[in-house]
Image (cartoon, rainbow, N blue to C red):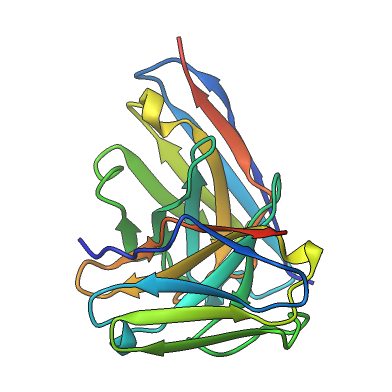
Amino acid sequence: DVHLVESGGGLVQPGGSLRLSCVASGFTFNDYVMSWVRQAPGKGLEWVSAMTGSGDRPYYADSVKGRFTISRDNSKNTLYLQMNSLRADDTAVYYCAKGAGYLDPWGPGTLVTVSS
Amino acid sequence: SYVLTQPPSVSVAPGQTATITCGGSSIGTKSVHWYQQKPGQAPVLVIYFDTDRPSGIPERFSGSNSANTATLTIGRVEAGDEADYYCQVWESSSDQHVFGSGTKVTVL
């Protein structure tokens, strides 16, 4: 069974930083593109970033480019999202998801709250 | 940037058919994927590559895609189908995933 579990969320002040992790199991991790998707409270889904299986090509949404950095450690089956210069509108549940064209499955998510 | 347009809400009586549209410029030339999200839960893939159903998804869920509109159809709607539904494409010109705004399906 494919399993994804995010961690690292929490409360952070505006301008602060946070690193999210997503541990994967049940599949050959380095064979797959992995993505981060977020959902602000009461809002829809917003794709944030993706990384190729080998870790050599990141992709970013315009809203996070220059502030967020995606990375992965294939030896640990773990995907990361380093979030810097956080703003109130970054407040959301952050999900990791497996796949390139379509995203399946998704982890349960981790909540990031940016507030003073 | 590429925009996907969905109706905010669809209401349907049990046993009837729910139709959810996803509009986008020449969306028929792209692969469209659909997700179901129930309150407090992560999204679940229900249709991929326009028409394919993942294992475990009932045959009542079907998809189509042509011209400027993709459609998710839920036949013989049940109370358990009440959820938010999102369409999604990979936009190759900008190398970004794009999600529709979501449609809330209410079972009357």
Q: Is residue B46 left or right of residue A39?
A: right
Q: Position of residue B28 (x, y in %)?
A: 32, 87
Q: Based on the displayed image, in which of its 4 quarters is residue A111 positioned?
A: top right
Q: Based on the displayed image, in which of its 4 quarters is residue A21 positioned?
A: top right
Vertical relation: B105 (above or below) B67: above
Q: Position of residue A42 (x, y in %)?
A: 54, 38
Q: Nearer the viewer, residue B92 or A52?
A: B92
Q: Based on the displayed image, in which of its 4 quarters is residue A82 positioned?
A: top left
Residue drawn where x is 33% and y is 84% of the image? B30
Q: Position of residue A114 (x, y in %)?
A: 46, 22
Q: Nearer the viewer, residue A32 or A35?
A: A35
Q: Would residue A39 be visible to someone looking at this image?
A: yes
Q: Quadrant of the C terminus of chain A?
A: top left
| Count of numbered labels shown in the rendering | 0
Vertical relation: B81 (above or below) A76: below
Residue drawn where x is 80% and y is 72% of the image? A1
Q: Would residue A74 be visible to someone looking at this image?
A: no
Vertical relation: B29 (above or below) B83: below
Q: Nearer the viewer, residue A27 or B48?
A: B48
Q: Position of residue B33 (x, y in %)?
A: 49, 76
